[in-house]
Amino acid sequence: MMAKVMLMSGAAVAALCVFTPVRAETVDFNAKYGITDVPGACSYAETDKKDYSGKKITILTHAVPVMGEPVALHSKQFEELTGGKVEVIHAPFGELYQKVMIPFQTGQHIYDIVYGGSYWIGDWAPHMEPVPQKYLDLAEMKDVTPAYQGVASWNGQRLQYTFDGDRNYFKYYVPPFQNEENKKKFKEKYGRDLEVPTTWEEYDQVAEFFSGWDWMGDGKTHYGSTEIVKRDDVAFSNFITRVASYAKNPNVKGGFWFDLETMTPQINNPGFVRGLEMWVKALRYMPPGGINYGIGDEIFSWGGGESLMSVTWDDAFVQAQQPDSPIRNKVLVGTKLGASMGSKEVWNRITKQWDKFETPSIAPYYTWGWGAGVSKYSKEKEMAFDWFCFFSNYANTNSDLLIGRFGVNPFRTSHMDPKYWEKGGGWTPEVAESFTNML
């Protein structure tokens, strides 16, 4: 908030004190914050007009850097612009749920804003303040894709303030697949051509072949695959992506985790078991210590060229496109068949047999994303929603989307245009189109 200087008029000598604000200087927010402001209700210029002096909100968010870093960054900016106080508390993913739910269940006011998995919305719902209509009417909110509007809603109410979107998919570094010597050696070993894999069995072979040697030519040892495997992190996402290929049968309707007619749990059926077995096998082709890789580790590992392939969220792909990345503009998304790996055998829970497919069956894990909202126990709801509005304005999102470690990923219709990434991030048309086609 720009300080407003008050001048006493001449009439005040004889009568009343009349205060007239001096016209504020125009602020160059790009020079001050390194972010190009975009006109709008929650822009830097408009947020600068708000006065929250003497007020405070507390935010519980994920650990730095993924989501925790941009929350801390924009909170500091919000403080400088409005005069209010924003306390940011970070926690690892494995602790977020209980840190949110314990005060919710006891009706305590500890956090004004809480972050976590968007899929927790059902448990959060009784304790969340619905997003006011004036924010839903903003251009930034109307630009959110229908899928992510739905993710943020419960029983017809928007309870989460949308600022992120996610998909779980396959990504790879291209040059090693094009190397003639690699092609020759691969065929000698496996009896087939070296191609971008389309099944987990093919993925396994490619990962094995490229694990433990310097295929990048930089004097370092590289590996076949990096995934999120760490306990109490988001390893569940990789588990779902892997087992879905074997357990999500396109010919069987009525549930995935349960048979919706009988409510028989499916977690131990042969499809789930095979997916888990393949995942355990894949650990041998990951970097040393890979079993302890959380989301941040995976972002820097694959995004920095440590491994050839990965099947995770958008973050690592954006990290690979950082200006200082050794694999920048040499990466692509998906296979010739779809967003992720598939399987030629899928368990049929009705017939209790494996159904065979000539073309691999693919069941990609489509939608998730970080979720956050304002607690109904907050005493500063207006300030909290204004903070959210500022956090996810066009200017901040345009900047955050291009920083892989931040964890802010495409969620607006405007983000689906390849020109957005070519112009904003310097991505080549081929890379940008590969990315947005997957989106």
Image (cartoon, rainbow, N blue to C red):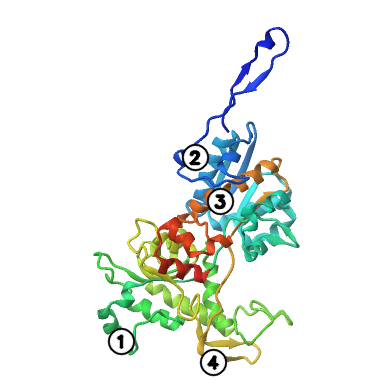
Check if mark 1's residue and mark 3's residue have beta carbons within 8 Å.
no
Residue 119 picture location, percent across and down: 64, 63
Estimate how packed mark 3 is, as few (under 14), some (14 to 19) or many (20 or more) residues with alpha carbons within 10 Å.
Answer: many
Give residue 356's mark: 4
Q: Amino acid at mark 4?
A: Lys
Check if mark 4's residue and mark 3's residue have beta carbons within 8 Å.
no
- Disc on the earlier residue, 4 or 3: 4
Of residue 285 and residue 65, the one placed in the foreground of this image is 65
Estimate how packed mark 4 is, as few (under 14), some (14 to 19) or many (20 or more) residues with alpha carbons within 10 Å.
Answer: some
Q: Amino acid at mark 2?
A: Phe
- Disc on the earlier residue, 3 or 2: 2
Q: Amino acid at mark 1?
A: Lys
Residue under the image location 43 percent in, 78 percent down: 281
**Quadrant of the image occupied by residue 188:** bottom left
Of residue 287 and residue 161, the one placed in the foreground of this image is 161
Give residue 29's mark: 2
- Which residue does the numbered mark 3 point to in the structure image? 394
Residue 121 picture location, percent across and down: 67, 60
Q: Amino acid at mark 3?
A: Tyr
Q: Quadrant of the N terminus?
A: top right
